[in-house]
Structures are given as C-alpha cells and as structure tokens.
Image: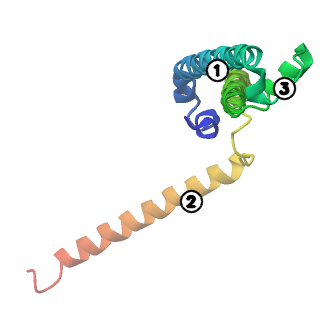
Amino acid sequence: MNYEDDLSIDESALDVEWLDQPQLMFKYARHCAELEKLSDEAKDKLEFVGAEIEKDIRSNPDKYGLAKITDAVVASTIVLQKRYKDALEEYNKAKFDAKVAGGAVRSFDQRKTALEKLVQLNGQQYFAGPTVPRNLYEEYKAKKEKREQIKRTVSAGIARGIQRQRTPENE
C-alpha cells in the first residue's frame, strides 16, 4: 500500500476522487484492522514466551545462574532472554505498523474533508482564471468594421467578375 499516492487529490478530477474515496477508506480501514489483529497476536505471543521462560526459570534457577528466586529477579531475567527479545521486537514492529495504518485511516477522513472543501471552492469559482472585463463598444465596432470589409471584398469580387465577362477576348 502506498499511503502518500492514495492520499493525494487531483483537484482537476474531483468527481473521480469522490468516486474513489469510499473504496480507499474501506481498503485502509480493513488494512488497519488486519494490522491491529497481527499486533494483538504478537502481544499474545510475547506474553506466552514470557510465561514459558518464567516457568523454566522457576523450575531450573541453576540453568539461569540464579541463587535466589524473587519476582523481581525472575522479571529481569525474562527480559534478558533472546526468545523474549525477539518476541518483543516482533510485537513492537506489529504495534508500529498498526499505528501507522491507523494514522492512514484518520488521514483518509481528512482527505474526505479536503474533498468537501475543494468541491465548495470549485462551486464558488475559486479555480476559475481571471477574466478581463469586456468592452462591448470595441467589440461592436470591430464586428461592424469586419462586416464592412466583407462587403467591400464581395463588391470588388463581383465588379472584377463583371469586367472579365465584357473583355474583347470573351466576346
């Protein structure tokens, strides 16, 4: 999943962006839920590994070089074990991924709000370019001059056509 690309908005295609929004939101909400499930499973595994190590420590304190078994000694010995460290690292990574996915879901909610605001701005002609005021007098004058020029051209063409018909070569 590419969070940045999916969160971007093409303001020239707001209708398409609105059509994509619900599917993207669902896709990321589902992704977030899956990552939260993995995080929960990693936490359960961490607790299980911790319980296994604690049981082994209490059963075999000599294996861990412990002379006296207290709750504090057992707890500190558990966190020093490689299996526990690996499980803790896996849990922390899963928790981080779930938090990032949760942030993406919140960002898609922000994207929805941004789309709403962009549509409002678009309806208020915010994205329209500047317009130059029209000078109707000049436009009318130019149109009138163009018509006069067309009339002169047509008249000249007709006059030339009549002269060609009367030439001695044609008679």
SS at mark 3?
loop
Residue 58 position within the rendered picture, expressed as x and y whole percent measured from the top left: 77, 14
Taking the spot 40% from the left edge, 67% from the top edge, the residue there is: 153
Say above or below: 24 vs 159: above
Query: Label 2 is placed on what type of residue?
Result: Glu
Q: Quadrant of the N terminus?
A: top right
Query: Label 3 is placed on what type of residue?
Result: Leu
SS at mark 2?
helix
In 3D space, how far apart are the residues under numbered discs 2 and 1 (Cα atoms)? 84 Å
Residue bearing the label numbered 3: 66
Q: Quadrant of the C terminus?
A: bottom left
In 3D space, how far apart are the residues under numbered discs 2 and 3 (Cα atoms)? 109 Å
Q: Nearer the viewer, residue 130 or 115?
A: 115
Q: Work out whether mark 2 precedes mark 1 in sequence or the reverse, and give the earlier one.
A: 1
Residue reaching furthest left? Answer: 171
Looking at the rendered image, the disc whose residue lies closer to the viewer, 2 or 3, is 3
What numbered label is drawn on residue 145? Answer: 2
Residue bearing the label numbered 1: 42
SS at mark 1?
helix
Q: Work out whether mark 3 precedes mark 1 in sequence or the reverse, and give the earlier one.
A: 1
In this orientation, does residue 16 appear?
A: yes
Tell me: 104 left or right of 167. right
Q: Nearer the viewer, residue 9 or 74?
A: 74
Q: Quadrant of residue 82?
A: top right
Residue 152 position within the rendered picture, expressed as x and y whole percent measured from the top left: 44, 66
Say above or below: 112 vs 160: above
In 3D space, how far apart are the residues under numbered discs 3 and 1 (Cα atoms)? 29 Å
Say above or below: 136 vs 47: below
Q: Nearer the viewer, residue 11 or 102?
A: 102
Residue reaching furthest bottom? Answer: 169
In this orientation, does residue 115 appear?
A: no
